[in-house]
Image (cartoon, rainbow, N blue to C red):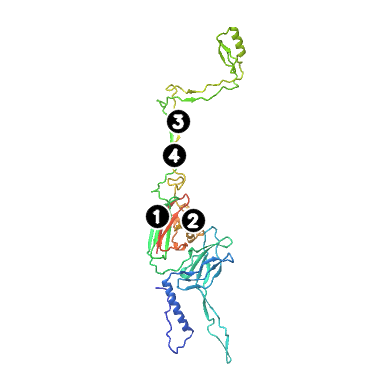
Amino acid sequence: MSASVEEPLDRLNYFNGQRLVAADLRVEQDYHIRVRRWLNRTLYTPGIAGGLEVQVSPISPRRVVVSAGVAIDALGREVILVEDTEVEVVGVPSTEEDWVFGNYLTIEYAEETVAAVQDGCSVRTEKCDLAWGGPTRIRATPALAFQSGWPDEAAGKVLLGQVELGAGCEVTHIHNGVRKYVDAADSAVRSFALEGEKNIDLSNGKVLTFHVRGGPPSSVLLYLRGARLSTLFYTELPEHVHAVDLTTDEKGDSADHAHDVELGNPSTELDGAHGHDIHARYEKNQDEDKSLRLSPDFDGAELTAFMGANAKAEGSEHAHALLLGTIRSSPAGGAGGHSHAITGQTTEPVGVSEAGSGGPRTGSELTFVDELKVFLDGNEITAQVLAQLGGPAAGWDTLGDGTGAHALIKKGTGAIDLLRVGQALVEGEHTLELEVDNQSGGNIRYNLYVE
């Protein structure tokens, strides 16, 4: 049973000669107002019916302008702004681009009494009677205000936008995605729930496709919780090599062998101090290369003179050129048997070195996710999710930090309201993607409830 009890829905029963006072007319007004509000909240969900767009003021970067428009709140009241209105911004500057905490601009129903009685006193004999009732009008004047927390819809607040501020409290961006519009109150959405888990890393994200049928949903809640990457199904091959440590056999044909050594054009050193004896049957040839050849006719005196003139004195500097060709280390199959040590590795390191190439990756073992990213229909909503969780002040500067000590692993996110992230979840197909853009990886468990 509801704690609040409404007054009976009465209206006037007119008859001739009836005396009407202010209280009677208020009953008449109250009847029509209450019937209309009952009808509004029965037919429509709270939200913006038209107008109420938010833009930066052309006069001041620290003010915004809300255009004329109408909304319906959770109590069925029409919230009507009859003219464009400027509002001074109140909020917290963003430390990072697209990161906004709070700064929600709302509108809610309000009214005030105006047009006070101007006739003053009426002189009747010697008395001064003041007019009854005071002000003669009740004027609907919607209240525009900023607040740090998500607006309480049940209290009659309608969200118009979220304002991003720079370091000087100037408006840098207006996020209109958080706006909620009126819809049919009974959309007959088919409720469903999805749950599961996925091991993800840089090359393997999770894409969850779901369909909204029967109209826009009234509730879409996502729960996330991290865990260690499963070792049961761990299939990565780390970078490695195969070592080789062999020695050729010292016996048999493979060991008993020789090597050909290719000669270049070496010569003896020019400063080699040595001499040469010249023996009989040679004579001096006077051509340019000063070589010696056999002489068919020579006598002892000529040979003695020749030897004395052409013998190289010991210690004189000269060189001898060696012939080009090959020599052998030892005769093949001879006594030069020996072996060779073979060490090293069979191949270059195996396994791909760049992640995302489709094969095994190198690096340390994957355990828990670091900085999980969340996308809804292709648009990243990580910042909005973190804002719902309380942001850095509540320990939610990222969705995971690569360790098992993070709140994502220890307790999970709790309910994330996807209707608050700034994207319309209309009837049709939608995708929810979970990814990491670094070398981390881990297990993510999810629950999605749509009503």
Q: Position of residue 230 (x, y in %)?
A: 40, 50
Q: Which amino acid type is marked by label 4?
A: Val
Q: Position of residue 353 (x, y in %)?
A: 46, 44
The crowding category of the residue bearing disc 3, from other C-alpha atoms within 10 Å (few below 14, some 14 to 19, many at least 20), is few
The mark found on residue 398 in the picture is 2
Instruction: Work out whether 169 lies above or below 33.
Output: above
Quarter of the picture containing the N terminus is bottom left
Q: Which amino acid type is marked by label 1?
A: Glu
Judging by the rendered image, the residue that carries numbered circle 1 is 197
Residue 206 visible in the current orientation: yes
Residue 450 lies left or right of residue 401; in this view the side is: left
Give the spatial CA distance, label 3 vs label 4. 19 Å
Give the spatial CA distance, label 1 vs label 3. 53 Å
Whichever of labels 1 and 3 marks the residue nearer the N terminus, that label is 1
Q: Are marks 2 and 3 in contact (CB under 8 Å)?
A: no
Whichever of labels 2 and 3 marks the residue nearer the N terminus, that label is 3
Quarter of the picture containing the C terminus is bottom left
Q: Which residue is found at the position 60% from the left and 8% from the top? A: 302
Instruction: Work out whether 161 lies above or below 38.
Output: above
Q: Which amino acid type is marked by label 3?
A: Ala
Judging by the rendered image, the residue that carries numbered circle 4 is 241
The crowding category of the residue bearing disc 2, from other C-alpha atoms within 10 Å (few below 14, some 14 to 19, many at least 20), is some
